[in-house]
Amino acid sequence: MNIEEVLAREGIRKSLADYTMAGDRLKVDDFVSVFTEDAILESEGVPQQDSFRYVGGEEIRRWLTRWQNKSGTELKAHEATFVRHHLTSCQIEITTANAARARTYWIAYTDIGPDHSGYYVDEFSKVHGNWLIAHRRIRLDWQSEESLFKTAIVRTKKD
């Protein structure tokens, strides 16, 4: 492994962590900043009612904004008082000087403990020195029967 590959892997890990921290805290600008301008964010292998696909930074921005509780309404995307996604094993493959693929396992904790888990299948592009997500496929492997996220995807669908 050479220094360029080490730097690429660390840049990718930084984007993975930035996505997770921003998403859990609903920091919309920080969340969108880890994607390329034409990025795709989509679910894969989930029931139809939980499937989604958003293309481009502005569509991704609108989607995450819908997770925020709007003032004056009781409708929340989910019933959790907190959410923490934890990234575990991550396999990164550098495919060119400006492109990479990764597969990362994750588990989300909420008020009930382990709530749901799965993995990300990502394609990264190096843009202005930063490794950004060009395409993210979110796979759900498991969800607790008591999951506080059961209604979240449906409640954040496009208007």
Image (cartoon, rainbow, N blue to C red):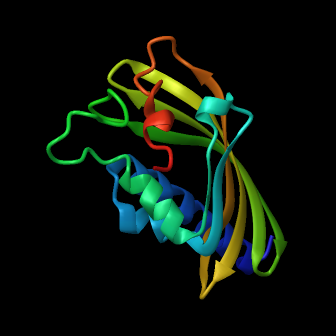
Measured as percent of width and height from the top left, residue 12 is found at: 62, 65
The quarter holding residue 152 reads top left
Q: Most extreme residue toward the top, as rendered? A: 145
Q: Which quarter of the image is occupied by the N terminus?
A: bottom right
Say which residue appears at 32% left-offset and 27% top-offset.
79
Measured as percent of width and height from the top left, residue 5 is found at: 74, 73
Which of the two residues, 91 or 83, is positioned nearer the viewer here?
Answer: 83
The quarter holding residue 107 reads top right
Q: Most extreme residue toward the right, as rendered? A: 95
Question: Vertically, is 126 above or below 69?
Answer: below
Q: Most extreme residue toward the bottom, as rendered? A: 128
Question: Vertically, is 77 above or below 63?
Answer: above
Left or right placement of residue 99 versus residue 131 in this view: right
Left or right placement of residue 3 versus residue 64 in this view: right
Left or right placement of residue 111 versus residue 124 in this view: left
Say which residue appears at 40% left-offset and 66% top-offset.
30
